[in-house]
Amino acid sequence: MELIKVDQSKCIKCGICVKVCPSKVLGMGENGPISIEPQGCNACGQCVAVCPNSAIDNIKTPLNNQTILKKFPVINKETAKQFLRSRRSIRCYKDMKVQREQLIELVNIARFAPTASNQQGISYIIVDDKKTLKKATEVVIEWMESQGENPLHWSFPYHIRAYRETGIDQILRDTPNLILAMAPKEMKNGRENTIFSFAYLELFATTLGLGSCWAGLFEMCAFDNYYPLLELFNIPTNKVLTGAVMVGYPKYGYKRLVDRKPLDITWV
């Protein structure tokens, strides 16, 4: 099958689809765009998305699967600034179950994040079982204790003491949910692609009334390939864990936008 189909009655031969193609898969023929290097198509869908007359279709990114964008930009500058700055790392959660439908909404929006060469390929594990979450904290604590007098991070003794002496969970913060990301072992940009996808997830979480926070200590244990942790979540042998984010309803509300360090720019 041909990579693209062009509706000649709609095509005005503007050539925009050719110009935006990142892999130079398309070229201009006498009757409009043609595929000259179809094997190079990475399914980004830009050729279909940019066409002003819906004249081009691509078998890898069908026109029927694309959503019409009625207005761009979608939101104004001030609203966007408030929205982006309002995201906070939430470490105190209500003892309240998050519905699975909302958790699915979160990971579904995460899959639309940009990935290197449009690889996509990030998959997710959603953990909502309290016993599993508690066991995960125990496993991470045991991993920290195994470090002995030369811990991987200076804070390990502090977290161990807090958990063993007072039962305070500073690993997963008593989160009701944990979302794990995985990538195929052969994917070179798995971690970077995960960071983008979780950035989307965290921003979208606020619209659902949810809060989130990266589970950094959990990640350190996972990235150290600590087998008891990987076994707990039954990570497939052909994949690696690439990230972990806690999700739940914030216990407290924030009334102000926190400032950051002054902007530092060098012009060249």
Image (cartoon, rainbow, N blue to C red):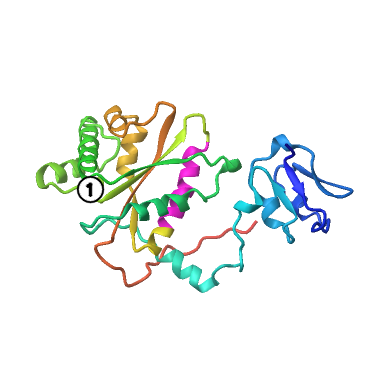
**191 within the magenta span:** yes
* Residue at the extreme left of the image, as rendered: 165
Residue 229 position within the rendered picture, expressed as x and y whole percent measured from the top left: 28, 33
Q: Residue at x 75, y 55 (%)?
A: 55
**258 within the magenta span:** no
Left or right: 153 with respect to 54?
A: left
Q: Quadrant of the N terminus?
A: top right
Q: Residue at x 34, y 55 (%)?
A: 212
Residue 109 position within the rendered picture, expressed as x and y whole percent measured from the top left: 47, 53
Left or right: 194 with respect to 36?
A: left
Closer to the camera in the image, 219 or 14: 14
| Badge 1 density bin: few <14, some 14–19, many ≥20, Cα 10 Å | some
Q: How many marks?
A: 1
Which stretch is magenta? Answer: 189-203
Q: Residue at x 82, y 54 (%)?
A: 8
Q: Secondary structure at mark 1?
A: loop
Closer to the camera in the image, 109 or 211: 109
Residue 196 position within the rendered picture, expressed as x and y whole percent measured from the top left: 49, 49
Instruction: In the rendered view, tell whether residue 42 sits above or below residue 249.
Output: above
Residue 95 position within the rendered picture, expressed as x and y whole percent measured from the top left: 20, 57
Left or right: 55 with respect to 121?
A: right
Which residue is denoted by mark 1 in the rendering? 170
Q: Quadrant of the C terminus?
A: bottom right
Amino acid marked by disc 1: Gln
Q: Residue at x 46, y 44 (%)?
A: 194
Instruction: In the rendered view, tell whether residue 116 sits above or below residue 48.
Output: above
Closer to the camera in the image, 153 or 16: 16
Tell me which secondary structure the magenta stretch mostly adopts.
Answer: helix
